[in-house]
Image (cartoon, grey):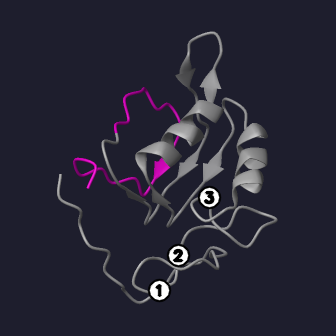
């Protein structure tokens, strides 16, 4: 799979944004993981582990603008995994302007709302 280059566009995001920087010096637009100043992708290891440990199946999530790798998405979905079914269960999911790299598959029934989720073959 060929990587699609990130294109800087004027930011009109209304959520609290990450203070991280993407390759090429572009400011990250990922949604901050409160109370931190970084998005999930830029959150340091111990803070990321603590955040993920605090998530529960059925909870809402908001990772607008976040850049997900296969590994990061797997870590997030694992935190939402229902022990009885071994499948992730997510409440309302917000992924506007998020990007997903690698072999990303969303195979599930989604009874809640998925605002702004656009899938294009994992690109």
Q: In this view, does 53 lie to the left or right of 117?
A: right
Q: Are marks 2 and 1 in contact (CB under 8 Å)?
A: yes
Which range is magenta?
A: 105-123
Q: Residue 54: horizontal and vertical position, in percent?
A: 79, 40
Q: How crowded is mark 2: few (under 14 residues within 10 Å), some or many (20 or more)?
A: many
Residue where numbered disc 3 is placed? 40
Cα–Cα gap, marks 2 and 1: 8 Å
For the residues carrying marks 3 and 1, which lies nearer the camera in this image?
A: 3
In the picture provided, is 82 more to the left or to the right than 88? right
Residue extending farthest top: 84
Say which residue label 2 marks: 29
Report the predominant secondary structure element of the magenta stretch: loop
Q: What x and y, as percent, mark residue 14?
A: 59, 78
The one of 54 and 110 positioned closer to us in this rendering = 54
Q: Is residue 36 magenta?
A: no
Residue 107, image x, y percentages? 37, 29
Q: Earlier in the sequence, mark 3 or mark 1?
A: 1
Instruction: Tell me which corner region of the image, top left, top right, bottom left or bottom right, holds residue 35.
Output: bottom right
What is the number of the mark on residue 11?
1
Q: Give the residue furthest to the front.
A: 45
Q: Distance between the residues labelled 2 and 3?
A: 11 Å
The structure residue drawn at horizontal position 23% and vertical position 66%, both measured from the top left corner, is: 4
**Circle 1 sits in a helix, a strand or a loop, which is it?**
loop
User: Pointer 1: residues within 10 angstroms few (<14), some, or many (20+)?
Assistant: few
Instruction: Please tell me whether mark 3 sits on a helix, a strand or a loop.
Output: loop
Res. 79 image quadrant: top right
| Relative to 96, residue 117 above or below | above
- Quadrant assignment for the C terminus: bottom left
Q: Distance between the residues labelled 3 and 1?
A: 19 Å
Earlier residue among tags 2 and 1: 1
The image shows residue 86 at horizontal and vertical percentages of 56, 16
């Amino acid at each position: 799979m060929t990587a699609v280059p990130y294109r800087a566009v004027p930011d009109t995001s209304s959520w609290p944004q990450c203070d991280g920087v993407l390759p090429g010096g572009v400011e990250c637009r990922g949604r901050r993981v409160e109370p931190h100043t970084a998005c999930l992708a830029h959150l340091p290891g111990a803070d990321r582990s603590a955040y993920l440990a605090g998530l529960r199946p059925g909870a809402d999530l908001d990772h607008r603008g976040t850049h997900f790798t296969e590994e990061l998405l797997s870590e997030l979905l694992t935190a939402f995994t229902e022990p009885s079914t071994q499948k992730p269960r997510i409440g309302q999911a917000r992924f506007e302007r998020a990007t997903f790299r690698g072999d990303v598959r969303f195979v599930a029934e989604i009874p809640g709302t998925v605002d702004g989720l656009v899938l294009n073959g994992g690109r």
